[in-house]
Amino acid sequence: MSFVLGKKVKIEVSGASHSEAITVKVSGLPKGEPADLAAVNDFLRRRQGGNARYTTARKEKDEPHVICGIEDGLLTGGDVEARFVNANARPGDYKKMRSIPRPSHADYVAYVKYGDTVDMSGGGFFSGRMTLPMCFAGALCLQILERRGIRIRAHMLSVGDVKDEPFDPVTDNVPQLADHVLPVVSGTAGDEMVRLMEAVSAEGDSVGGCIECKVTGVPAGIGDPIYDSVESAISYGMFGIPAIKGIEFGEGFGVCSDYGSKSNDGFCLRDGKVSCITNNSGGIQGGITNGMPVVFRVAVKPTPSIYRPQRSVDLEKMEECTLQIEGRHDACIVPRVLPCVEAMTALVLMDLMVE
């Protein structure tokens, strides 16, 4: 198995949820670029658990031990390698589930494909913990892109049936997110989301949601048609985040009921440059960026680990059974997935722009 992403700017990750450590290697980053590790650590804290009643109680420091590639605060041009210790692992929580697959987890398909050759404690290498090295690499790319005027911002558009205000898809303005524990435009919506997540957690259940991401400052002409489109590259990366089950760009599935006269993005001139009146295409046409903000949304599934009895099958006895999951789990994974979406977007765009 090879966990590698990218063509010019590549990341390679190894390890598992309850292994001794997780490692990451990033290659292709430009030499001499500043690398602010304090800012990287701030970014990584955004995906940490253990900070609220609706997140997992597992608490890890998530501090990268940089082995090579950064010297005196600058990228050397060689591979950047870092290691994250799994100090708070509890594989014993998953012993009884080795022969009983958890519903909507990767347990069954891993059993079919790999047998007993992999440790699925905490999800093994299918776990959301594998997004930690992704966020480390993405945080470095975010710094490089921002110095070139490209900003990537995401917010929680919805949790369950609670909805936040959407971003303006046309202008380069990104609203200041509310002074709230959650990344939302409306603090009122954020309060309702917290109440819902806490209620769901108390019931031993989980809930999903939607994340909206907006990228500004992307020049026209990035990407290629057909299989190397910007949509293809972003989608490929997003589905490397375990909780993502869907993605749409611009108006997305809203175009299904539209007419061309409404859906088409008419051209205009703004400040002497060709622009679009609307942005139903999400900043991408023919697989290539058109200079408008790149806007997309991803669907995040409810955390499959819930504290309610669920139906499963004992694979050793080949008998149907009832499974009661233990361990430490998120009632809603959306807040922790959000920085992963920003990081993955940065990785993909960095790779496309270098290429």
Image (cartoon, grey):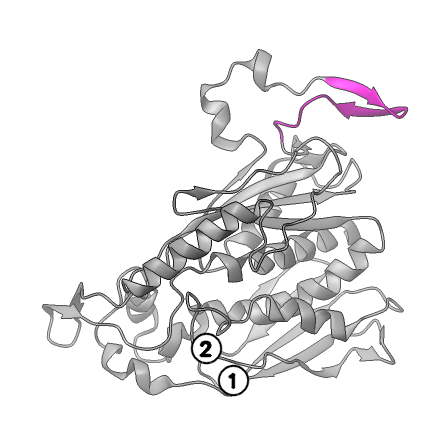
Q: Residue at x 65, y 49 (%)?
A: 177
Q: Is 44 a magenta residue?
A: no
Question: In this figure, which residue is indicated by the disc labeled 1?
Answer: 86
User: With 191 as the anchor, is 231 left or right in this view?
Assistant: right
Q: Is 269 a magenta residue?
A: yes
User: With 287 as the anchor, is 171 left or right in this view?
Assistant: right
User: With 245 as the anchor, is 274 left or right in this view?
Assistant: right
Under mark 2, the amino acid is Ser
Tell which circle, 1 or 2, labels the residue nearer the N-terminal end: 2
- The reply to whether residue 2 is visible in this rendering is no
Residue 169 drawn at (x, y percent): 66, 33
Residue 278 drawn at (x, y percent): 67, 23
Disc 2 secondary structure class: loop
Q: Residue at x 38, y 61 (%)?
A: 198
Question: In this figure, which residue is indicated by the disc labeled 2?
Answer: 17
Comparing 246 with 151, the one in front is: 151
Magenta-highlighted residues? 267-281
Under mark 1, the amino acid is Asn
Asked if labels 2 and 1 touch by Cβ distance under 8 angstroms, the answer is yes
For the image shown, how many numbered marks are present on the structure? Answer: 2
Mark 2 neighbour class, 10 Å CA radius: few under 14, some 14 to 19, many 20 or more: many
Marker disc for residue 75: none
**Hey, which quadrant is residue 21 in on the image?**
bottom right
Q: Residue at x 15, y 77 (%)?
A: 316
Comparing 105 with 198, the one in front is: 198
Disc 1 secondary structure class: loop
Residue 267 drawn at (x, y percent): 75, 18
Residue 33 drawn at (x, y percent): 86, 66
- The reply to whether residue 19 is visible in this rendering is yes
